[in-house]
Image (tube, rainbow, N blue to C red):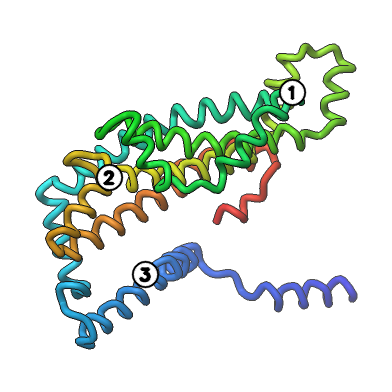
Amino acid sequence: MLRQLAMTIMAKQTGPKLAPWRSSLIERLEFVLPFAAVAVAWQLLAMSGSFPSVLVPTVPRILQTGWDLVRSGVLSGHLSASAARLLIGFAIGSTVGVMVGLAMGLSIRAERFFLPLLNLALPIPSIALLPLTVLWFGLGNLSVVILVAFVASVQVTLNTWTGVKTTNGLLLRVGQSMGASRSMIITRIVLPSALPFVLTGLRLGLARGWIGTVAGEMVSASNSGLGWMIFNALQFLQTSTMLVGVATIGLVGYAIEKIIFQSIESWTVVRWGMLDDQRLR
C-alpha cells in the first residue's frame, strides 16, 4: 500500500514522459528562444527611430551583411587568420601552463617561486599588455601569439596547480604502499584526479586567449583577423559588419565549448564518474 502511494506521488512529481521527438523539439525551442527575443528587441529598437539607422541597423540588414561576407569569403578569411593565431598561442600557453602547474603542485619550492608571480599576473587584462607586446615584438602575428600564450598560461597553471593540490592523499598512500614509482603515481593518480581542474583551466585560458586574439588584432594585425575586421569597419561606420564580427566571435567561443570541451569531458571525467553529466546539458 505504501509502495503504491509512493510510486503515485513520484509519478505526479515527474509528470508524463514526453516522446523523444517532442522532447528534442522543446530543447531546440528553448535554445532558440533567447536569441529570438534579443533579435526582436533589437529590431524594435532599430525601427523606433531613436538612433540613426547607420548606428543601429535592422536585423534583416545585419543578416544580409553576414550573408554577403560569408558568400564572398571575407568572413572565412578573417576567421581562419584569428583561429590560427589563437590555436598556436593557446597550444604554447596550455603546454607551459600544465607543466608549471604540475611542478607547483608537486614541489613546494616551485609553488613558492611561481605563485606570487601568478597572483600578480592574474588581474592584468590582455588589453593592458598589448602596448608592450607590440613594442617588444612589433606589429604582426608574433605579438598576438605571444599575448595569447601568456594570458592562457596563467589560467591553465593556476587550475592545474589547484587540481594537483586537491588530489586525494589516500590514493597517493595506496599507490606508494603498492610500490608504484613516482612517474606512475603522477600519470595514473595525480593527473587523472586533477583533470577536471585542468579542463576548467583550459576553458578559461581559451576564453582569455580568444579575447586576447581579437584585442591584439585590433592593434597589431595588418590586414586580417576578426579584430582587424571590426576595427576597420568602425572607421567606415559599417555597424552591420561590426555586429557580424562580434556575433562570429561569440559563436566560435560557444562552438568550442560545446563541441570540443564537452566532448572531452564526456569521454573522460564523466565516463569515470568524476563529473555529473547533467551539468553538461
Q: Which mark, by number, is residue 35?
A: 3
Which residue is found at the position 55% from the left and 37% from the top? 154
Question: Which residue corresponds to mark 2?
Answer: 219
For the residues bearing labels 2 and 3, Cβ distance under 8 angstroms: no
In-image side of 49 versus 248 (left or right): left
Location of residue 197 in the rendering, given as x and y in whole percent from the top left corner: 64, 40
Q: Label 2 sits on what residue type?
A: Val
- Residue placed most toward the observer, 161 or 180: 161
Q: Of label 1 and label 2, which has the lower sequence position?
A: 1
Q: Residues within 10 Å of mark 3 (few under 14, many from 20)?
A: few
Q: Position of residue 83 (x, y in %)?
A: 31, 39
Residue at figure coordinates x 51%, y 26% from the top left = 95
Residue type at mark 1?
Arg
Q: Which residue is mark 1?
A: 109
Circle 3 sits in a helix, a strand or a loop, which is it? helix
Tell me which amino acid carries mark 3: Phe
Q: What is the count of numbered marks?
A: 3
Q: Mark 3 or mark 1, which is nearer the start of the sequence?
A: 3
Q: Position of residue 216 (x, y in %)?
A: 32, 43
Where, quadrant-wise, is the C terminus in this rendering? bottom right
Residue 281 shows in this picture: yes
Res. 46 image quadrant: bottom left
Which type of secondary structure does the marked residue at label 2 adopt? Answer: helix
